[in-house]
Each structure stands twice: as structure tokens, then as C-alpha cells.
Image (spheres, rainbow, N blue to C red):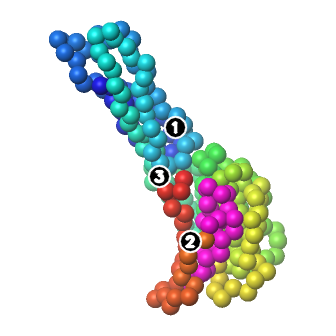
Amino acid sequence: TITASSPTMTYGGTVPGVTPSYSGFVNGDSPSSLTTAPTCSTKATSASPAGNYPTTCSGASDPNYTITYVPGSLAVGVDYWLVGSDGGVFAFGAPYHGSTGALRLNKSIVGMAADPLTGGYWLVASDGGVFSFGAPFHGSLGNLRLNKPIVGMAADPVTGGYWLVASDGGIFAFDASFHGSTGALRVNKPIVGMAVDPLTGGYWLVASDGGIFAFDAPFRGSLGNLRLNKPIVGMAGSPGAF
């Protein structure tokens, strides 16, 4: 039996080699006794989203053995960054691309998004100013007068652009697909965050009362009709969807 290894890697990193392990040899035989050695691989790449990917071995041969194969699994994990209101970025296992910590900003930083294509990131301020680090700049609202402040941003997994979201649910798309907004609606409580559905390319908005607004993304439920002890402050898509 030949079993493929189960290595791990960090998203954006180098894909580790897949190696075989063996069992069942007799009469002093070893892997070097095989007529043809196996080749092992995985379809995961450095751009593969976090998750588990099969590893396989195949191609071994020897007239003295019936060879069976057992697959393994490559686990792709993610590290993270923290961002302060001054734009200071703190990297934990993830590559550091830069920050606005040493700059004087007009408004505080309120959000951050990772570029799924380059591995860099963007920071956004409450006035809609966008700062790019290791990621392409697609535009900003820093020179415009906004009705409501920006409260967050998210990357479009399809186009590589990004969205900015305001506290009234207004969506501003920069090289990203516009799926809708609550900017023209009267919402009970301000929007405080957004999350992207990587399967549909749509997104959800969430209000501080737990109300959810789905735009080209499946509606799973909300807390808008419940009395909460404390307000909702954000949301995230389940990693199982990636």
C-alpha cells in the first residue's frame, strides 16, 4: 500500500511536496525494489483558498506486488493581520506589506480587506480613502462628500476589485460587481459590516440590530426581530463556503 502524505501550508505560500509512505513489503524488499516508483502530487496551488485538498500517488509498478493507494490531504491555512484606527498593521504569520501608521490621516481607518489575487491588502478610512499595500489601487471616495461614513470594505473574489460599504448600506464598487445596496432604504439601525459569498460572488450586509440584507447571496436568517443584549458589530462568511 502506498499512502500520500498530508502536509500543511499557509495560503499564498509555496506548495509543499507530496511524498509516499509504504507498507506491505516482504522478503526484505523496500521502496527501492519497485520497478517503477510512484509520483505524488496535489492540485492545490499557492492561490488555493483555505481548506483541504486531496493528495494522491500513482504510477508505481512491480510484478511481485498488487499495489493499492491511499490518498492524503493538504491543509491550506491562513494567518492574519490586525489593523489599528491609525492604519498601523500588525502581521501574525502573514506577510507585512506596509501601513499608514506613520502618516497623518484625515479620518480613522475603519476596515481592511485582503486581495485574493496578490496576497496584499487594502485599508479604508471612514471618508472612503483607500490605501493599497501589495495590492492594486482601484479607486476611492476620499475626495467626495459622503452622506454617511464608510464602515467597512470587502474584496470581490471574482474580479479582484473591492466594495466599500457606508453606514446607510450604500455600496461603492471599484472594479467589482454591484449587486445592490440599502442606500435608498430607511434601515432601522446602521449597517456595521459586510461579507462576501465566494460561491455566488454576491454579498451580505449586517446592521447593528442583526438585520441581514442579502444581495445575490442566499439569505440564511437574521436577528432583526430579536432583542439583543449588545449590538452586532460585524459578520464573516463561513470558511466552509470557500
Comes first in the chain, label 2 or label 1:
1
The secondary structure type at the circle numbered 1 is: loop
Do we see residue 164 in this rendering? Answer: yes
Q: Which residue is mark 3?
A: 79
Q: Nearer the viewer, residue 88 or 180?
A: 180
Q: Nearer the viewer, residue 216 or 77?
A: 216
Q: What residue span does the magenta drawing correspond to? A: 195-218
Check residue 44 in the rendering and tell me which mark sits there, or answer none: 1
Outermost residue, bottom side: 227
Task: Indicate the position of residue 168 as horizontal and vertical percent values.
Answer: 71, 80
Q: Which residue is mark 2?
A: 220
- Residue 117 to residue 142: above or below: above
Check residue 201 in the rendering and tell me which mark sits there, or answer none: none
Q: Nearer the viewer, mark 3 or mark 1?
A: 1
Residue found 48% across the figure and 33% down from its top: 42
Marks 2 & 1, CB-CB < 8 Å contact: no
Residue found 71% across the figure and 76% down from its top: 169
Cα separation, mark 2 vs mark 3, equals: 27 Å
- What amino acid type is highlighted by mark number 2? Arg
206 in the magenta segment: yes
